[in-house]
Amino acid sequence: MTDKKLTRRDTLVKAGGGAISLAAAMTLVNDTASADDTYSKNEIVQVASDFFGMTTAAVAQAVERIFSDLGRPNAYIKGEEGSGAFVVGLRYGKGMMYRKKFKNLRVYWQGPSIGFDVGANASKCFTLVYQIRRQEEIFQRYPGVEGSYYFIAGIGVNYQRTGRISLAPMRTGVGLRAGVNAGYLSYTRERDILPF
């Protein structure tokens, strides 16, 4: 009888050890999958330079700065937008969000801005998206301080954040909009003419 108990105990210990090993292996696989779901600096530079019609060297300077601040994105949005301001401004855009292993998703964005700002522009917008888990999480309001804007190699960049999700829009285009303003962008499934 003692031999049977030892055998059962040994079996349970081995099964428990196997379950722990399996759990550790699954964690390792999930970590690897997460790394595989992000975009490398080279991937982003290539896609963004093709989109903007600029040299990879010019785009690489802006991407280098964003990667040093935020790391590797797990999605990006390619789109176009228009904006204008005389103290109070408006911005409207549309594009497609791309993620590895997900279907491309149409997105619209709009938002007001208030501050010392004058001008208008039409631009291409390439937005890096960080820490998004579900596709529909993009559909919310992202506050940003556009005065934190910087300009590298002909590309304007600013950051926006809601909770854990950060956005880094990169813009090039026709026109000039300069100044310090604060506002937000709301990302929606459908076009909305009201920016509020």
Image: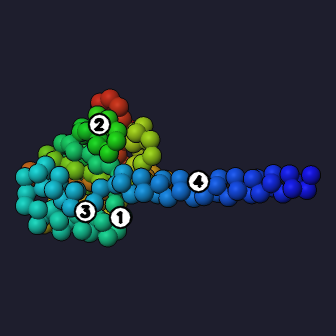
Mark 3 is surrounded, within 10 Å at the Cα level, by few (under 14), some (14 to 19) or many (20 or more) other residues, namely some
In the depicted view, which residue is nearer to us: 182 or 64? 64
The span from disc 3 to disc 2 (Cα, nearest Å) is 20 Å
Q: Which residue type does callout 2 highlight?
A: Asn
For marks 1 and 2 on the same chain, the one whose residue lies earlier in the sequence: 1
Q: Nearer the viewer, residue 145 or 25?
A: 25
Q: Which residue corresponds to mark 3? A: 41
Q: Is residue 28 above or below residue 120?
A: below
Q: Which mark, residue 104?
A: 2
Q: Along the polypeptide, which appears first: circle 1 or circle 4?
A: 4
User: In terms of secondary structure, where does tag 3 sit?
Assistant: helix
Dot 4 amino acid type: Leu
The alpha-carbon separation of the residues under discs 1 and 2 comes to 22 Å
State how many labels appear: 4
For disc 1, the marked residue is 71
- Residue lying at the far right of the rendered structure: 1
Q: Position of residue 162 (x, y in %)?
A: 45, 52
Q: Residue at x 20, y 65 (%)?
A: 62
